[in-house]
Amino acid sequence: MSANPKIASGTMYVSPEDVVAAGKRIAAYTHRTPILESHLLNSWFGGHRIHFKIECHQRVGAFKARGAIHALLALKERGVKPEHVVAFSSGNHAQAVAWAGRELGIPTTIYLPEFVSSVKKQATRSYGAKVVETKTRMQAEEMVADAVKTGATLIPPYDSDDVIAGQGTAALEAFEDADVAFDAAFAPIGGGGLVSGTWLAAQAITPATQVFGAEPLNANDAARSLRDGKIFRWPDSPDTIADGARTLAVSERTFHFIKKLGGIFEVTEEAMMYWTQWLTHLLKVNVEPTSAMGMAAAQQWIANLPAGTSKKNILVIISGGNLAPSSYKKIWDKDFLIATPAPVIPALR
């Protein structure tokens, strides 16, 4: 499996088997994160069981650790040890590459747009990376491209077979560890690496599972791309509290898999903050707004099930839990927990 092959129309280079192999490759470096349920939440949804894969308990606090360490381990297996690794990111991938580089003794430089949260910037530095701040996401990408021309090795946040295979191991573990077969799985979309890996993992373990993406309505480039049949690209980072979804566009590689999904649910800013509060409260874990999108999407999916549908088993990937104080303040500015005795479940019908 090559790291960055050109995608030909109709060709799939990274396979379900690659995700399974990635799971074995990274096992010694990553946590096998838990699956949690809220019986109270299930009762509010009429008995549908919602299972949460808790990637905020992963190394660096996010699923991104899986893709970063797998990309470097795969290179090592091919006999390649980069002298210098670079990456651009809106936060969690930055920490992941910095951590993976430290684990394998490889110097790293990370290019971060200035809007990235202070917590993620500081964490990236704490793992030993050099951090270069830029005005925009596009400038970060351009500076990384210049570094690659001088010999650095890029670990992309999503546009890499090795990264996708590594990120897919989150869902792979959930499919392997759960006591049920899932009817549907929901993952957030930024660049599309996690949802692509989730689809591949489903194909490996439980092909009958429908896989859906969740994306901010304010940053809906993947949904637009799917509707238009061609990739839509933002001129600059879109305005959304979901900093993990401020990517400019999906890639041809991830778009290949996005077209295979059951669909993409577009999530409002208020719905993200609503479910960030409720999941934090019910699951007792840190939840980033990007992570909460999966629950908002699952809510929409359940609301549209035909009357009398049998109870469903649903997987929602909580992709990360790294939040800056400024984000906490914005999320909790309005109290959604005053809705009693339960969240307003029909809100998105």
Image (spheres, rainbow, N blue to C red):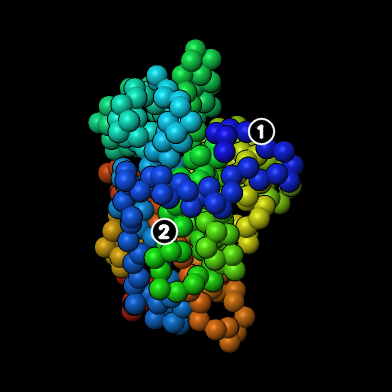
- Say which quarter of the image contains residue 98: top left
Q: Residue at x 32, y 61 (%)?
A: 34
**Disc 2 on helix, strand or loop?**
helix
- Can residue 225 be seen in this snapshot? yes
> In what quadrant of the picture does the N terminus appear?
top right
Relative vertical location of residue 201 with respect to residue 145 in this rendering, above or below? below
Viewer-closest of 196 and 231 = 196
Circle 1 Cα neighbour tier, 10 Å, few/some/many (<14 / 14–19 / ≥20): few
**Disc 1 on helix, strand or loop?**
loop
Picture coordinates of residue 48 (x, y %)? 46, 78
Picture coordinates of residue 283 (x, y %)? 30, 65
Q: Residue at x 46, y 57 (%)?
A: 172
Q: Amino acid at mark 2?
A: Glu
Identify the disc placed on residue 21: none
Residue annotated with mark 2:
173
- Can residue 332 be seen in this snapshot? no
Residue annotated with mark 1:
6
Question: Across the whole image, how many numbered discs are drawn on residues?
Answer: 2
Q: Measure how far apart labels 2 and 1 are at the Cα level.
A: 29 Å
Q: Earlier in the sequence, mark 2 or mark 1?
A: 1
Circle 2 Cα neighbour tier, 10 Å, few/some/many (<14 / 14–19 / ≥20): some
- Say which quarter of the image contains residue 202: bottom right
Q: Residue at x 40, y 73 (%)?
A: 179
Q: Is residue 234 left or right of residue 166?
A: right
Picture coordinates of residue 297 (x, y %)? 52, 62
> In what quadrant of the picture does the C terminus appear?
bottom right
Viewer-closest of 330 and 23 = 23
Q: Amino acid at mark 1?
A: Lys
Viewer-closest of 93 and 84 = 84
Looking at the image, the residue that sits furthest to the top is 150
